[in-house]
Image (spheres, grey):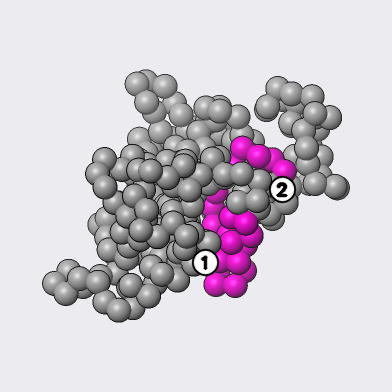
Amino acid sequence: MIELAGVTVSYVGRDVLTRVDLSVGAGERVALIGPNGAGKSTLLRVISGLVAPGEGTVGVGGDPIQALDRAAVARRIAVVPQQVSVPFSTRVEELVALGRLPHEDPLRGARPSDRAAVIAAIERVGIGGLMGRDVRELSLGERQLALVALAVAQQTPILILDEPTVHLDLRHQVETMQLLVELNVGEGTTVVAVLHDLWLAATFFPRLVMLDRGAIVADGAPMDVLTPGRIRDVFGVDPSMVRLPVGVG
């Protein structure tokens, strides 16, 4: 479903990703972990076609991403960024409806099925109480949930998320992770998410990809990736201070 081979990305002469090889199969659920500056968010931007690598190739669904126009990419990949700026008055349901644009008829606009998909996504994420609210007036956590609903409404085979729980309280963190599991297990959606919380990553994702200084340093099951030595070397902290599920670390 996602294939990266020898991907290198440089900003202002500095390599952010260096010769990265990554393969994610259809229906996998993968968390990208690592310290700040490791290249996780850049890797997501490469997968979604927002950043073109200086070297290497990127394939999505069997096609080179550079061969797809933005509408075609949007029908394959939904992206939940860390945060977005909304410069003008937009109701929550209008923001979520943007997820249907790749599917709408360019001449006829939204169909009843598109409007139904928007309402279903809002209810599934649990933000029905926010309908009618101006997105600019929402808390950061509420706005983050609206972005998740937008991605759910997009109904793509691939969902990628950049720190989706960063602004959420504990309950909404867990509920968002449970939703990702439901989309993955129940509907076969391929999920790739950047997470800083190692407990959430190890609890809800069967495969972890650890990055450090622009390279993949570990890839596998949580118990194999989150070893005490690797936590100490990559994150620079005492492993005993890190909260992990029982049996991991």
Q: Nearer the viewer, residue 166 or 204?
A: 166
Q: Residue furthest bottom?
A: 112
User: Is 192 drawn above or below residue 86 in the view shown?
Assistant: below
Quarter of the image where one finds residue 67: bottom left
Amino acid under label 2? Answer: Ala
Position of residue 143 measured from the top left corner of the image (x, y, whole percent): 44, 47
Residue 150, labelled with which disc? none
Q: Residues within 10 Å of mark 2 (few under 14, many from 20)?
A: many
Residue sitting at x 47%, y 63%: 128
Query: What residue range appears in magenta?
Result: 175-199
Residue sitting at x 44%, y 56%: 130
Q: Is residue 201 visible?
A: no
Residue sitting at x 56%, y 33%: 215
Residue 55 located within the stretch drawn in magenta: no
Residue 202, labelled with which disc? 2
Amino acid under label 1? Answer: Arg
Quarter that holds the C terminus: top right
Judged by its main secondary structure, the magenta piece is helix
Which element is circle 1 on?
helix
Residue sitting at x 72%, y 43%: 199
Residue with the mark numbered 1: 124
